[in-house]
Image (cartoon, rainbow, N blue to C red):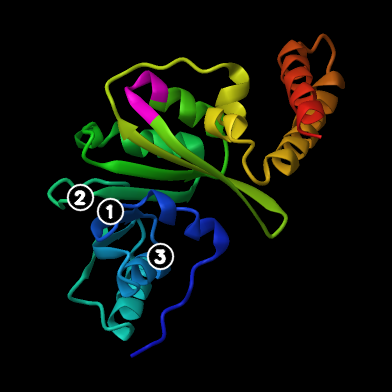
Amino acid sequence: MQSIITPSARLCSALPYLTKGGAVIDVGTDHAYLPIYLVGQGISSRALACDINRGPIESAERNIAAAGLGDKIDTLCTDGLHGAEGYETDDVLIFGMGGELIIRILSEAPWLKTPRIGLVLQPMTRAHLLRGWLLENGFSIVGETITHEDRRYYQTIAVRYSGENEEYTEEELLLGRLNIQNNAPNLCGFVEHEIDVWEAILRGKSRATDADTRDEERVLKFLKARLEMLK
């Protein structure tokens, strides 16, 4: 039996938000390292590993078999969550995708609109758009984490359907209300990173004639104010 690989810190950021001993669906599973770890360590009882490409699914199946977990982890080659409706799950993981792609996957799976299923999401880009979509569609954000790994910052967002429509400020959409309220670890570094990103955007737009830079200036104003509060 193959030894179980411990996932990276950014993947392990999902652990506090998962149902202990529950079932999990991992979307975009790649090599299925996370489902193998979750089931192998007894964190999850069973898992469904999904990926849109056949190659990663075949790699996942080999790794699952080598770990001796073929009776507890199933695979599904599909786009997003199509075909996963009948799998009774407690949690759904979607890591390593852009915020807009995650929105598309969730919007095509209306069966997720139940308080019974938790979603743990890690958008690689446009987290603010994802938060906005979640709030507009009745999902409540119940947990957030910022992970720093390999000189990058990753936001993990745990949500559950409540049917309510909460309103966030622009700053809360970008940084996360719970991250701000809890002064989350890595928040200061993340804000500094976001300032660098938005300053680069502002410089690029400023080179264009008649460019409207009010949005960038507004975002930079509240980011710099937040950084002063954190220091």
Q: CA distance from mark 1 to mark 2?
A: 9 Å
Q: Which residue is mark 3?
A: 34
| Side of 124 where 43 appears, left or right | left
Label 2: few (<14), some or many (≥20) within 10 Å? some
Give coordinates of residue 218: x percent, y percent: 74, 14
Q: Is tag 1's residue or tag 3's residue first in the polypeptide sequence? A: 3
Q: Residue 229: which quarter of the image?
A: top right
Q: Which residue is mark 1?
A: 78
Q: Label 2 amino acid? A: Ala
SS of the residue under disc 2 = loop
Q: Which residue is mark 2?
A: 84
Magenta stretch in the rendered image: 135-140
* Any part of residue 201 in sight: no
Q: Label 1 amino acid? A: Thr
Name the quadrant of the C terminus: top right
Along the viewing direction, whichever of 112 and 186 lies nearer the viewer:
186
Label 1: few (<14), some or many (≥20) within 10 Å? some
Q: Is tag 1's residue or tag 2's residue first in the polypeptide sequence? A: 1
Q: Label 3 amino acid? A: Leu
Q: Is residue 138 magenta?
A: yes
Q: CA distance from mark 1 to mark 3?
A: 18 Å
Say if 197 sits above or below 53 in the image.
above
Residue that extends furthest to the bottom in the rendered view of this protein:
1
The circle on residue 174 is none
Q: Are marks 1 and 2 in contact (CB under 8 Å)?
A: yes
Along the viewing direction, whichever of 54 and 102 lies nearer the viewer:
102
Say if 205 sits above or below 178 in the image.
above
Q: Are marks 2 and 3 in contact (CB under 8 Å)?
A: no
